[in-house]
Image: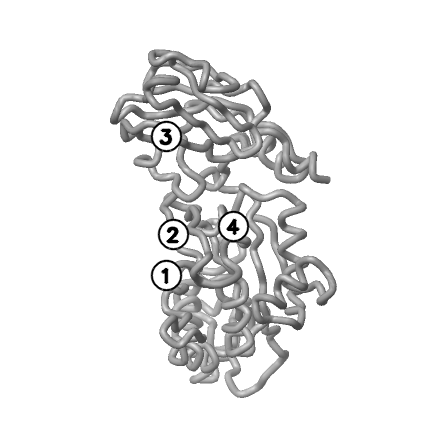
Amino acid sequence: MSEIRRHGIGRRHFLYGAAAVAAGVMSNTGCTPEDARGADGQSGVPVIAVDTQRRSFTVSPFMTGVNGAKWYDHAYGMWDPKHNRPAPGIVGKIKKAGVGMIRYPGGTSSNLFNWRAAVGPQESRGRQVEGKQGDTVDSRFGPDEYMAFVREVGATPQIMAPFANSTPDEIADWVAYMNAPQGTTWGDLRARNGHPEPYGVRYWEIGNELFGTYQRYWMSADDDKAMRQYAFGGTQRQKRQRVGTPTDHRSSAAVSNGQPHQSFTVWYPPVVPKSQTIRVDEDTWREVADLASAGADDLVYTFAPESGGIHFGDGRHGKIPQKGAKITADHPRRDRARAAQ
């Protein structure tokens, strides 16, 4: 408010002007700069006039875009699973609203999206990890369903390719699936899935709001370091991180059920080989090449660095983690981004 006073604008005039703009009274009453002068005769008070009758310029359809919310649970009603089509009621409302661009598969919830699990016959699609809470969710509203919806409403497609769990090669494959012609690996797969013509998706982004510390995933909490990791790749050690499964990062997925042959995975593979520390509660267990040579009480496991897979024994060859024990991992994530360039 001190800046306003230096320019000769009283608090009362400023607040009146802001309220007038919000209510639209300036355009309705024909308010002029002369009308805006106060009782003290001060001039130079800024006035914003709203003319609802004249169009000054055309608004780009990309300025009227929306985020496609979530891809799972039939995209919150965007897809009609009974008739395998875009939901007519939603289509009509979006057309009426004049939405020009629709983003897919979403924001924070899509930071761990696996596009390959979301194409092909519905009965063969896998589940995957939701990027915000780590829940296990379905893959029913995939890239092909999204494009059917976008074309139905007449909007422009825009895709957010996740950064936290993807490599440049994996994202390039997705671009090829959407845009490559038949006669190529990904164009032929799209054709087999019922869509022979390329979609021609031009607008892509890499990652969602990774500037926020709550969306760093494997990256550093330090802003400068995280920015360099995003741009150039890098290795970041994960400390005391809960394990999970490829489709579930909830806390319950890191807990032993007491059964033989349990398998878990680290959240963000691949891992630098021989660099990991795996703990069962507070006990550090040891990696072995083969459980067959282990004794019944040996605290051992096998490990696959590329997938981050951890496999425990059966009580005869390697001890079974006790029921209710929490499994955690320390490890540096291998630099997939730089290796793929």
**Between discs 4 and 3, the one toward the N terminus:** 4
Name the quadrant of the C terminus: top right
Could you say whether the residue bearing mark 4 is in a helix, strand or loop? Answer: loop
In this rendering, the label closer to the viewer, 3 or 1: 3
Residue shown at the point (43%, 82%) measured from the top left:
92
Q: Is residue 25 above or below residue 186?
A: below
**Between discs 4 and 1, the one toward the N terminus:** 1
Whole-Å distance between the Cαs marked 1 and 2? 8 Å
**Between discs 2 and 4, the one toward the N terminus:** 4
Q: Given contact means CB atoms under 8 Å apart, are the residues at marks 4 and 1 in contact?
A: no
Instruction: Name the residue type under label 4.
Output: Asn
Whole-Å distance between the Cαs marked 2 and 3? 22 Å
Q: Name the residue nearer the viewer: 246 or 96.
A: 246
In this rendering, the label closer to the viewer, 4 or 3: 3
Residue under numbered circle 2: 137
Q: Given contact means CB atoms under 8 Å apart, are the residues at marks 1 and 2 in contact?
A: yes
Mark 1 burial class by Cα count in 10 Å: few <14, some 14-19, many 20+: some
Residue under numbered circle 1: 73
Could you say whether the residue bearing mark 1 is in a helix, strand or loop? Answer: helix
Image side of residue 226 versus residue 316, left or right: right
Where residue 44 appears, as percent x and y from the top left, is: 55, 67
Q: Is residue 233 above or below residue 17?
A: above
Residue shown at the point (45%, 77%) measured from the top left:
94
Residue shown at the point (63%, 58%) measured from the top left:
204
Whole-Å distance between the Cαs marked 4 and 3? 24 Å
In this rendering, the label closer to the viewer, 2 or 3: 3
Residue shown at the point (37%, 47%) measured from the top left:
136
Image side of residue 327 versus residue 237, left or right: left
Residue under numbered circle 3: 262
**Between discs 3 and 1, the one toward the N terminus:** 1
